[in-house]
Amino acid sequence: MTPSAALAAARQLLDRSDELARHTDVPGELTCTYLGPAHLAVARQLAHWMGQAGFDSVRIDALGNVAGRYRGRAAAGRQAPCLVTGSHYDTVRNGGKYDGRLGILAGIALVQALSEAGLRLRHDLEVVAFAEEEGVRFGSTFLGSSAYAGCFDTALLDRRDAQGTTLAQAIVQAGRDPQAIAQAAAPPGGIAHYFEIHIEQGPVLLDLDAPVGVVGAIAGSVRRRLRLAGQAGHAGTTPMRLRRDAACAAAEIALYVESRCGAQQGLVGTVGQLEVPGGSVNVIPGLCTLSLDVRAADDKLRDAALADIEAHVAQVCARRGVQCRAEELLRAPAAACDPAGQAAWAGAIAAQGLPVHTLVSGAGHDAMMMARVAPISMLFVRCGAGGISHHPQETVSQADVAAALATAWAFLHEVDGGPGAPAC
């Protein structure tokens, strides 16, 4: 892919990101929640662009995944492993334009470049826009990629949103059939390699002054909700030494999470939600709820920190006369990226005359689910605005997107069958 072709493709990608961002549940911000009107409109638009780009077939499955396939020359007439790339098109509330969607649009751009040049790979190439990854509406992440990987949990069909609508009902209301979810799995023949192009969602590449980077692993995460029950009481008449203050216990726990996870490289811990239900200014908090999110690229490192946090919670609660009930919301194992895939990305980056950096992804990605069924790899693209993501200020530059597309072009031909990517 020539520099001028990469720049033109990058310009088109950014324009398409702007166009998709016009579809929103909330005017004045970008909120695209699963199976809402904006979500359905984005799916239709992506399918339309796939058709224009030269895909041989395009389908939208029961969960809303949009998949386009570009046939390879070696796979004609028989089932053979395919190359797959993609990401998600749902958003967080008031999110950014590039999280997930950049990877989908990059995949479409690669197929468009192949089609316009009259080129066919050895393998089929499938680009998948996964319908749901963020978990905003039903509280369960990776709905789209789990179905594509053949790992969908049918118990989730009974999960309800804030309005009481079940997932099954939402699928029917969207004009689709929950009984057809099994058909959302990747077509027969298997997956030779899954790769995902994604904004970094952090400041590391910005700090390194590098437009792209190789992902070495995706951190595994555990999320829990803790409910601390003490004893409410009058703020003026209960002596400090006799209090069973649930909020003070939560504060001790939150500070311990910060210190414990800050003591080791590659470990992060967050208390993102902290609430005193029905609290009053003149009442000792008798109840407090808090969230816990611990992540690391090494599951043993993460679980050792969790064990220490659990022990500290027990100690704090015993000393303060507070009871704790913990509910585990999510446990996702760390996903190591395929060494051969990492090497191919490193070679593709070096071929562009760029420095090669390897990063750990602290954020979860659809690649984690795809790792259950295929070798995976990822390319990160630098974020501007301090590396901010999940925010309206999320941004990327045309030059960086062009660098990512040129790198992906070289990578694609390497994993397809060896060096020597033709110019485009």
Image (tube, rainbow, N blue to C red):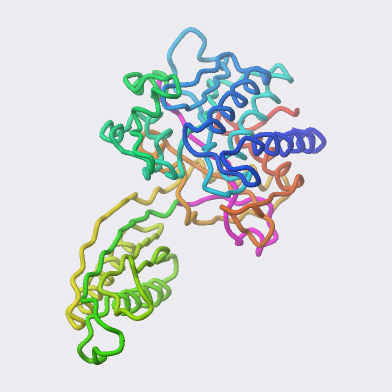
Q: Which residues are magenta?
A: 189-217
Q: Which residue occupies the extreme right position in the image? A: 4
Of 308 and 346, the residue lying toward us: 308
Q: Position of residue 332 (x, y in %)?
A: 34, 49
In the shown orientation, is residue 205 left or right of residue 358?
right
Q: Position of residue 267 (x, y in %)?
A: 41, 66
Q: Residue at x 54, y 39 (%)?
A: 32
**Is 382 within the magenta?**
no
Residue 279 picture quarter: bottom left
Q: Which residue occupies the extreme top position in the image? A: 77
Question: Is the N terminus in the top left, top right, bottom left or bottom right quadrant?
Answer: top right
Of 38 and 413, the residue lying toward us: 38
In the shown orientation, is residue 344 left or right of residue 382?
left
Q: Residue at x 50, y 14 (%)?
A: 75
In the shown orientation, is residue 234 left or right of residue 363?
left
**How many numbered circles does the render carry?**
0
Compared to residue 286, the image places residue 360 above or below, namely: above
Of 306 and 97, the residue lying toward us: 97
**Is 199 within the magenta?**
yes
Q: Position of residue 150 (x, y in %)?
A: 34, 28
Q: Residue at x 59, y 34 (%)?
A: 104
Compared to residue 61, the image places residue 370 above or below, namely: below
Question: Is the C terminus in the top left, top right, bottom left or bottom right quadrant?
Answer: top right
Q: Residue at x 41, y 28 (%)?
A: 148
Q: Position of residue 71 (x, y in %)?
A: 56, 16
